[in-house]
Amino acid sequence: MVKAMWNDVVIAEADLAQCQKVEGNIYFPESAIKKEFFQPSSTHSTCPWKGEASYYTINVKGFENKDAAWFYPKPKDAAKNITGHVAFWKGVKVV
């Protein structure tokens, strides 16, 4: 089992076999995130081989972590394995 934690709260949890590892990041299936902690962000970025990323801001215990989770709604063919998956940064611990 792998977990994503921020502010001492588990915000995502899945069997490792359900996750994808890309460029050192663990991508959790979207069904594994605890949606009550996630708010869509207007931020977007582009990766040359994965495509356009969208972001979530995480809110836990009254604290906000802006754009701390990202996903690719329509990844390019080379990254199809991360369709429907979410990854983390900005202090979110994956254990």
Image (tube, grey):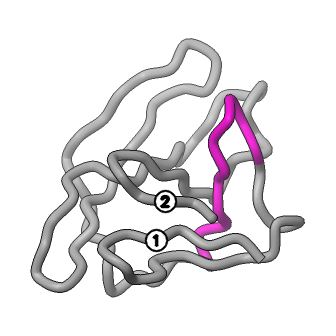
Instruction: State whether residue 39 is above or below residue 48.
Output: below
Q: Which residue is drawn at 65% across and 53% down?
A: 27
Query: As rendered, which of 87 and 62 lies closer to the eye?
Result: 62
Residue 50: quarter of image: top right
Residue 8: quarter of image: bottom left
Q: How many residues crowd mark 1 within 10 Å: few (<14), some (14–19), many (20+)?
A: some
Instruction: State whether residue 51 is above or below residue 56.
Output: above
Discs 2, 1 touching: Cβ within 8 Å:
yes
Query: As rendered, which of 2 and 52 lies closer to the eye?
Result: 2
Residue 5 image label: 1
Q: Which image quarter is the C terminus in?
A: bottom right
Callout 1 secondary element:
strand
Q: Residue at x 46, y 71 (%)?
A: 5
The residue tagged 2 is: 93
Q: Is residue 30 left or right of residue 47?
A: right
The x, y position of residue 81, in whole percent, is 79, 45
Callout 2 secondary element:
strand
The x, y position of residue 14, in whole percent, is 71, 76
Q: Residue at x 76, y 28 (%)?
A: 77
Q: Give the range drawn in magenta.
A: 21-32
Instruction: Look at the image and say whether residue 8 sits in the magenta stretch.
Output: no
